[in-house]
């Protein structure tokens, strides 16, 4: 993703500004217009990134494998209720922000338009399963960083996203042969294949 920290910080400042301005004043209207321009710039920059990435992936491989993620469910608030308050709310909020800023659904839609073949596989346990031996265990993920993967069964170590990407690709190819787990979109597949890892962990 392009670095949009400055634009996002400006957007947050402008969101707070109207609360200190008089309603229906020209200053308040000017702030609203400025906020709209900043938000439009953020959206355009994200869309441009989606175009470039989807074009590159489609050019490098005719078949792209992606996880079938429930983005709406993944970005649900962790605050909970007064009777049952949530835990790790700040961390979950940060993860939600990363997911929404990346725009997985929009990227997948562009891939389906540009790539010859897009295979969507179930996301269940792709990040917990060892690609080398097939062992499935939540302890395979490092709880401190969530970026490291070490299999408790065979000792295989890799970056968690790379291990998950290999699992996604393997499932896509198996599903393409059996047509029971994976769903395909796009034009006819070319021989090459490329796995797109979409880990939800920050």
Image (cartoon, rainbow, N blue to C red):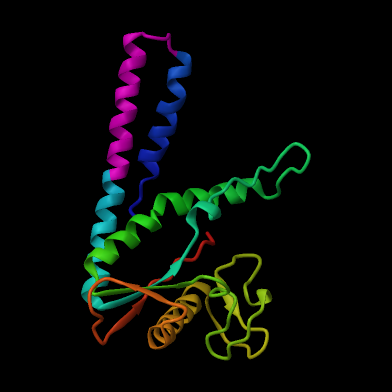
Instruction: Decide if residue 120 is on the left or right side of residue 26.
Output: right
- Residue occupying the point 36% across, 15% down: 28
Instruction: Decide if residue 152 is on the left or right side of residue 111.
Output: right
List x then y, in percent, for residue 82: 75, 36
Q: Nearer the viewer, residue 171 or 46?
A: 171
The residue lying furthest to the right in this view is 83
Determine the image quadrant of residue 117. Answer: bottom left
List x then y, in percent, for residue 101: 41, 49
Position of the N terminus by quadrant: bottom left
List x then y, in percent, for residue 187: 23, 74
Instruction: Decide if residue 44 is on the left or right side of residue 133.
Output: left
- Residue occupying the point 39% across, 33% down: 11
Whether residue 27 appears in magenta in the rendering, the answer is: yes
Whether residue 199 appears in magenta in the rendering, the answer is: no
Residue stretch in magenta: 21-43
Determine the image quadrant of residue 121. Answer: bottom left
List x then y, in percent, for residue 151: 62, 83
- Compared to 59, does 93 lie above or below? above
- Residue occupying the point 63% across, 71% down: 142
- Compared to 42, does 65 lie above or below? below
- Residue occupying the point 29% across, 24% down: 33
- Compared to 190, does 56 lie above or below? above
Q: Nearer the viewer, residue 133 or 5?
A: 133
- Compared to 49, does 129 lie above or below? below
């Amino acid at each position: 993703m392009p670095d949009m920290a400055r634009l996002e910080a400006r957007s947050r400042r402008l969101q707070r500004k109207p609360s200190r301005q008089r309603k229906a004043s020209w200053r308040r209207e000017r702030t609203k217009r400025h906020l709209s321009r900043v938000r439009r710039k953020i959206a355009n920059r994200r869309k441009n990134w989606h175009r470039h990435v989807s074009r590159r992936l489609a050019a490098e491989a005719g078949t792209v494998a992606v996880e079938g993620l429930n983005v709406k469910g993944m970005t649900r608030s962790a605050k909970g209720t007064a009777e049952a308050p949530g835990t790790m709310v700040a961390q979950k909020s940060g993860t939600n922000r990363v997911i929404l800023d990346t725009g997985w659904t929009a990227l997948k839609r562009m891939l389906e338009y540009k790539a010859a073949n897009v295979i969507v596989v179930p996301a269940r346990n792709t990040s917990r399963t060892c690609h080398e031996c097939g062992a499935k265990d939540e302890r395979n993920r490092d709880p401190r960083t969530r970026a490291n993967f070490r299999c408790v069964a065979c000792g295989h170590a890799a970056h968690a996203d790379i291990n998950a990407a290999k699992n996604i690709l393997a499932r896509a190819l198996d599903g393409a042969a059996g047509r029971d787990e994976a769903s395909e979109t796009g034009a006819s597949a070319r021989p090459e294949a490329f796995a797109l890892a979409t880990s939800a962990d920050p």
